[in-house]
Image: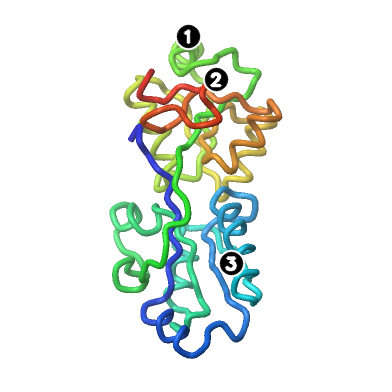
Amino acid sequence: MNRLLHALLVAALLGGFAGAQAQGWPTRPIRVIVSFPAGSAPDIVCRFVTERLSRAVGQQIIVDNRPGSGNVIAAQAAARSAPDGYNFFCATAATLVSNPHTFKSLPYDPARDFVPVAMIAKGPFFVLVHPSVPVKTLAELVAYDKANPGKLAWATDGLRNFTGMMAAWLNKIAGTGILTVPYATMPLGIQDTLAGRTQLVILAVPAAAPRIRSGELRPLAASFAKRVPGYEDVPAISET
């Protein structure tokens, strides 16, 4: 878990991409479905890629945000879209890897309904704390929670997603009792943490970076095997 990677995989509907290329693709706008809301880390990465891809292929690319239900809404919409090479899915690893193990049933099959085109990003999560909490390391966080039970809460995107899983895992291995608060979308959780209503949040680099730079949130650790380039002063969880 300390090597948890946030992997984004662009997936085209099965059979669509190769056929579309043979017909002079693209001749009309392309849609890319994202299972997270605007401003979230997957959305930021997807828009970064699609903006440049749009210029490269000379066609408009529309980002279609469909958050909710543990990525199921977006995945189902993508799976039911026409397999014509104009419908793509910017899927997180949770959608394709963990959902089949955390849901009893799904309205899509990751292996049957999608074919991978490219992995466009992978990276660590940062454990972030509101600056009002007097801790600078995970060890200090553990000690603070045990001395002040009931005062801390994680903002997560639910136990079926990586931030919720990671918060639960950290609670388990550290013996802490930090409350886990699930949010329908992570931008809402981020706003509550910035306001101090929750004190902790776990974010991927694209969403964490501006909050770290501004000093709005303090990084305690990164979920990587080694320190993240550009954030060498933030220890990896494996070091703690």
User: Dot 2 corresponds to which residue?
Assistant: 151
Rendered image coloring scheme: rainbow
Q: Amino acid at mark 3?
A: Leu
At x 38%, y 33%, the residue is 168
Mark 1, other Cα within 10 Å: few <14 / some 14–19 / many ≥20: few
Q: In the image, is residue 177 above or below residue 55?
A: above
**What x and y, as percent, mark residue 25?**
53, 84
**What x and y, as percent, mark residue 28?**
62, 84
The answer to the question of whether label 1 and label 3 lie on touching residues, with beta carbons closer than 8 A, is no
Mark 3, other Cα within 10 Å: few <14 / some 14–19 / many ≥20: some
As rendered, which of 59 and 31 lies closer to the eye? Answer: 59
**What x and y, as percent, mark residue 35?**
51, 60
Q: Amino acid at mark 2?
A: Lys
- Quadrant where the N terminus is found in the figure: top left
User: Dot 3 corresponds to which residue?
Assistant: 53
Q: In the image, is residue 16 above or below residue 224?
A: below
- Quadrant where the C terminus is found in the figure: top left
User: Dot 1 corresponds to which residue?
Assistant: 147
CA distance separating discs 3 and 2: 46 Å
Q: Is residue 154 left or right of residue 96?
A: right
Q: Secondary structure at mark 1?
A: helix
Q: In the image, is residue 225 above or below residue 72?
A: above
Q: Amino acid at mark 1?
A: Ala
At x 40%, y 33%, the residue is 224
At x 42%, y 32%, the residue is 223
CA distance separating discs 1 and 3: 51 Å
